[in-house]
Image (spheres, rainbow, N blue to C red):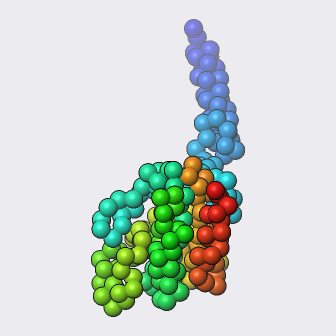
Amino acid sequence: MNKQNIVLIIGVVGISSLILTGVLFLQGKNGGAGSVVDSTKFNFKNAIGQKAPDFTLPDISGNNVNLAGLLGKNVVLFFNEGLMCYPACLDQVVQLSQDSRLSSDNTVAFSIVVDSPTNWQKSEKDLPYLTGAKVLFDKNGSVSQLYDTLKLPSSMHKGIYPGHTYFVIDKQGIIRYTFDDPYMGIRNDTIAGEIEKLK
């Protein structure tokens, strides 16, 4: 094989490689086979009917609560700023915990806050009505981000902390209701009504 043929073969192989790389890159950008783009990113606006993203967070006792472990129950999640949002968020946290319609063999409600368990325990001394609240601690905000709650209208610190956002998840782990509340009211009746629809 002469030198010219070797150069020609190398050139053809090189060009073919470039074309193949370009095709794979474009498929990735368009979500085709071999895609490197995450097309499954959770979006609050399109959450209803989607499977709720799984997570594990600690409660006040240090026990880990895993969402997938709650299959078979209706689950209410209330994302909020916690201690920084006094009294509106804290009032709703307490009201959710004390509502028998949202605490039964079939239904459980958790407030997801960005506080640390240590700070929460300290605050219970000054605000004893917080004691016993069903709170999960999302200290680094990763679950709040996963659920796309950081940039909604209710957030007072957009991109950093959630505001006042609800999810109702059915027994199969499917999101059936969402509500972002910039007015930061007590929404137990609304949430209980949505739970009732799941029966």
Q: Quadrant of residue 193?
A: bottom right
Relative image position of residue 86 (x, y in whole percent): 48, 89
Query: At 63% across and 49% down in the image, what residue appears?
Result: 39
Q: Quadrant of residue 56?
A: bottom left
Q: Is residue 54 above or below residue 99?
A: above
Quadrant where the N terminus is found in the figure: top right
Relative image position of residue 98 (x, y in whole percent): 47, 76
Query: At 51% across and 74% down in the image, what residue appears?
Result: 99
- Can residue 159 be seen by looking at this rendering? no
Relative image position of residue 69 (x, y in whole percent): 44, 51
Q: Is residue 49 above or below residue 116?
A: above
Question: 63 or 13, which lies in front?
Answer: 63
Q: Is residue 125 above or below residue 169?
A: below
Query: At 35% across and 59% down in the image, what residue appears?
Result: 64
- Can residue 132 be seen by looking at this rendering? yes
Horizontal side, residue 193 vs residue 146: left or right: right
**How many numbered dots are placed on residues in this image?**
0
